Amino acid sequence: MATIKQYTDKDGTTRYQFQLYLGVDPQDGKKKTTRRRGFKTKKEATLALSRLTLDLQQKGSLVEENNILFETVYHEWYQQYVNTVRESTWARTAKMFDNHILPLFGNKRLRTITVNQCQKAVNKWFGEVTYNYTRWYNYLTAVFDYGIRQEYITDNPAKRVTMPKKPTEWGEKPANFWSKSQLATFFNCINQQDEPEKYTLFRVLAFCGLRRGECLALTWQDIDFEHQTMSINKTLTQGDRGKQIIQAPKTKKGMRVISLDPQTTDVLKHWRSQQRRMFLELGFNTMNTDQLIFANTKNRFKSLNMPAKWLTKIIDDNHLEPRITVHGFRHSHASALFSAGASIKEVQTRLGHEDAQTTLNIYTHVTKNQEKAAVEKLVNYLNF
């Protein structure tokens, strides 16, 4: 029961105050109190306390049963989620929750979260990023769905959110691939004799179409020099706490054996002999079959960021345009295959896409020469 206390304000006048316990906030689980002060008489304070107490009794206690925190439900959901995905995925998902979802919902009671609060969260994410807001929303929805299955709640407020959409931008998007001549210019900027590893890495990216992680995970036993093939069966990625780990490719089609052109085979042979000499000076024997093709000075995995650092410096030093990313070499490889007349199925198989639609969705660009040839074919056909 609240008690009324007397106090003296700054000018020495006697005043009365009280503090009333309201119960537990159903959303954040914290105890709530209210303090009222400034009453001229004890009777005035007593009357206000009585009214507030009656009002609280009529509304009922703020305490609700079975009102579990969102963060608690998330951790329950996460424990079963890690058994369904790869380490790199569940590690990335945990960071996403820690940085974007839990700060907004973690301390709220699951059953009290409203559609409006979910909408405000999605609107906030939409204003901050270009694409990831949909992924964060989907994971938010997944936690609520888990809560329904566990009978913590009966409704998913996130499913009644209106999803914002980015307006279609006019004009052409910056190209993330290079043409044949642009690739040739790039390789002329690297001295193969002085920087054999750097030259070899970008040669493999451009002429084999590998993903960055697939390239950095390659070992010499993956190269069959006799038959001129490369086996892609693993990828380097980030796991728990940012540790670099080796994983199997994401899909079955990612496990593949591709043909090597003679010049790329020769480039790899040259780098192998150079690597043996260089690493022998560092005290490492690289004759083992599981020796990494691209390793750091401690003969361990290179940083996943290293290819991008190399590429950025080459582009900056030589003022190359357009600027592309490391993944742009994979795009360039696909574009070159299409330009050379390869079919969708052939490109899909070489790139390790699970289905042809992925190939079509990602690699819709064609070279200007292809576009010109298409127009010429149209004119020759219509012929009027």
Image: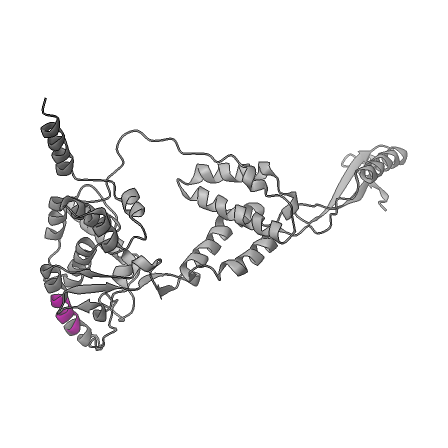
The magenta-colored residue range is 269-276
Please indicate, yes or no, whether residue 309 appears anywhere in the rendered image: no
* Magenta run includes residue 15: no
Using residue 46 as the reference point, say whether residue 370 is left or right of it. Answer: left
Residue 251 percent location from the top left of the image: 35, 58
Please indicate, yes or no, whether residue 151 appears anywhere in the rendered image: yes
The residue at the point 15 percent across, 58 percent down is 199
Quarter of image, res 192: bottom left
Depth order, front residue of 23/18: 23
Using residue 178 as the reference point, say whether residue 116 is left or right of it. Answer: right
Residue 189 in the image: above or below residue 174:
below
In the current view of this chain or complex, which residue is farthest to the right? 43
The residue at the point 13 percent across, 60 percent down is 264
Residue 381 percent location from the top left of the image: 11, 29
The residue at the point 12 percent across, 67 percent down is 269
Depth order, front residue of 309/337: 337
Residue 74 in the image: above or below residue 6:
below
Magenta: main secondary structure: helix
Q: Which colour scheme appears in the figure?
A: one colour
**How many discs mark residues in the rendered view?**
0
Q: Quadrant of the C terminus?
A: top left
* Magenta run includes residue 274: yes
